[in-house]
Image (cartoon, rainbow, N blue to C red):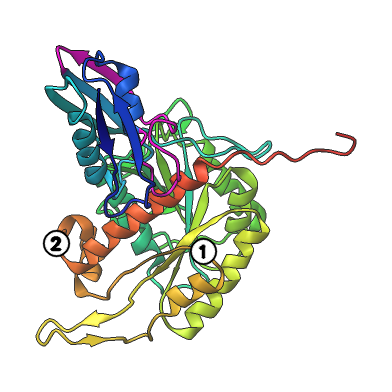
Amino acid sequence: MQRLEFAFSFAGFAPLREISYAFLLMTELNEQLILDSLRQIQDPDLHKDIVTLGFIRDVKIDSGNVSFRIVLTTPACPVKAEMESAAKEIVSGLPGVRSVAVTMDAEVPKGRGLGDKLVIEGVRNIIAVSSGKGGVGKSTVAVNLAVSLALDGARVGLMDADVYGPNVPIMMGASEARPEVDVNKLIPIEAFGVKFMSMALLQPGDKPMIVRGPILHGLVKQFLSDVKWGELDYLIVDMPPGTGDVQLSLAQLVPVQGAVLVTTPQAVAIADVRRALRMFETVAIPVLGVVENMSYFIAPDTGNRYNIFGEGGGELLAKRYSVPFLGAIPLGIEVREGGDKGVPVVVGKPDSPQAQAFRRVSEEVARQVSIEAMKPELVVLGKGQ
């Protein structure tokens, strides 16, 4: 009898205790043997092994040639490559294995339903992108977050709920597009792999939206239920700034998986985003984290860094309220040019520091959504139960 030792860990994954398995070299290679060996790999966020989490699918063995799928909770998983490499290495060391083929896949889990709220057919997770005040680049973050997730292979929708300043169609390069109607439902416009809808598509030109609370509630409900969104992993909702009617309507109508709060480092913006954070807590919407936009500027001629709007405010806010800091986006002309031209920076300048920062933020958002979605349902018991 020969004892095979497996002790596995790698960058990005939580430290694992050493696990040893004893196999007879003459033991026939089978599916259970493979699954037991793969239990050494743990998801760094869900803190369980990938077999227990149900990530391993379709194990096949043919004359020592092994193949299987690893189905993650998001296509934007930042440790996907490391997990694939680790799985190959572990299974390759099993007795009787000649080759290993691993297919990486993803199925975004559906967010937890909340009571009797409206559930949009086909939409797995709703993410609100919000800010305490205007002028912090909230819509820019929402657009680049949506396009980044689509670039990673997710099915993404973008709902422009900022009815007073609907800029998403301009940023997506489709301001002249008009949605069609199919059986009393609007067909969203698609650009850069993202389906989107905006009041600017329905009421073009410079005519202002002059509406009060009850009408706003109806508009939000129509955008949620009267648009043919189809199958989506994520529906990103670009919220108006502040803590007003649209935020409350969204919270009342649908199960929102979480909110992404956008701020700049300056004190005024931080003070306002604190109020937004408290508002989401009040309406029981988890805060997925804080994004610090226009965080700093790197001079292209000298390489010097300038903290134009202050330094570290977003990260300090996240620490103070014990929510994740999703990342810092540097200030750069590439972002402004992309928004004006209708080509998001993650597509137009993918190698720029701004685009790379947005891609990292999208990975963090996807990670936090997966963590929230995998949490157990909260059960509220009535009196006498």
Residue identified by numbered label 2: 351
Q: Secondary structure at mark 2?
A: loop
Q: Amino acid at mark 1?
A: Val
Figure quadrant of the C terminus: top right
Residue 273 on image: x %, y %: 53, 72
Residue drawn at (32%, 42%), measured in percent from left and top? 189
- Look at discs 2 and 1 and give the one toward the viewer: 1
Q: Which residues are magenta?
A: 39-64
* Left/right of residue 21 with respect to residue 314 in the rendered view: left
Q: Quadrant of the N terminus?
A: top left
Disc 2 versus disc 1: distance between alpha carbons?
29 Å
Q: Residue 45 appears at what percent x and percent y? A: 42, 49
Residue 343 appears anywhere in the view:
no
x 35%, y 19%: residue: 32
Determine the secondary structure under disc 1: loop
297 versus 76 height, above or below: below
Q: Amino acid at mark 2?
A: Asp
Q: From this view, report whether residue 109 is shown above or below residue 130.
A: above
- Asked if residue 251 is among those painted magenta in the image, a careful observer would answer no
In this picture, residue 300 sits left or right of residue 344: left
Q: Would you name the residue on which mark 1 appears?
A: 323
Which residue is at 50% across, 78% downward? 270
Residue at 32 percent across and 40 percent down: it is: 154
- Residue 163: mark: none
| Residue 366 x/y as whole percent | 39, 49
